Image: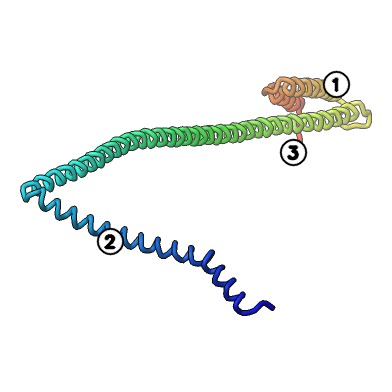
Amino acid sequence: GAPPRKKAAVRRMWVVRFVLPEVADAYRLKLLEAGRVELAGSLMSLRHTMHGLLYLDDHVERAATRIQAWWRGVLAVRVVSVLRIRRKMEEVHEIMGRAAGRVQARARGLRGRAACRRMRREMEERRLKVEREEHERMVRMVIKLQTWVRCSHAKREANRRRKRRSKELAAALDGSQMLRATSENVRRSLDPRGSNHASSPAAATAAISASEGDSHAQRGAAGADRKGGGGGQKGVHNGRSGHHAAGHTPRRKRA
């Protein structure tokens, strides 16, 4: 390799050309910064000294008064700004309060009208329900009344038909019995072996009268049944009176 002297010379040259200028610059900057700080301190002390020489206590008081007035003005402006903001906030609060009142009134009005409509609807439903129940009750009462009246008419008609049927049966039974009695009387009156030969014409006449009375009674009962009145009973009574007049006792009418 190279001899040590050459190496040392190269290192020395490298340090002189590259390292020493950087180190020298850094040291110079440090000295300049220190000198600047010291100079600033010196200038400040010099300024204070010059201020003390130029301005007296009266000047200081006036300057302090001006500073206080300026600061008080700043505070006043800030206070006025705060007061303006407060007044604006109060106005906004009042506006919001009025708006909230209108909104609440609107909402309460809507809710009240809705409640009123609901109450009216419920009242109408209750009224319709009461009317419907009353109508149904009246319909049931009318149906019951009609049922009772129809039952009464039906019972009356059934009784009337039953009576008419019983009268027809009684009249038919009385007529058949009277015909048998008449035929028996006629047979007895015409029988030459009978004991009452002298009274045969009279007995025949009585038998013919009884038969005519029976026919009249039957026609009267039929007419009474058609009219629904009491003519049938009158015809039956006339027939029975004719039968009594003929000298025969009528049998008891069957039910």
Q: Nearer the viewer, mark 3 or mark 1?
A: 3
- Tell me the element at label 3: loop
- Give the residue pinned by disc 1: 201
- Tell me the element at label 2: helix
Left or right of 225 in this view: 14 = left
Q: Earlier in the sequence, mark 3 or mark 2?
A: 2
Q: Residue furthest left?
A: 58
Q: Is residue 71 above or below residue 236?
A: below
Residue 255 has which mark?
3
Q: Earlier in the sequence, mark 3 or mark 1?
A: 1
Quadrant where the C terminus lies? top right
Q: Nearer the viewer, mark 3 or mark 2?
A: 2
Q: Earlier in the sequence, mark 2 or mark 1?
A: 2
What's the CA distance linking mark 3 and mark 2? 161 Å
Coordinates of residue 147 in the picture (x, y in percent) = 64, 34
Name the quadrant containing residue 185.
top right
Q: Residue at x 18, y 53 (%)?
A: 47
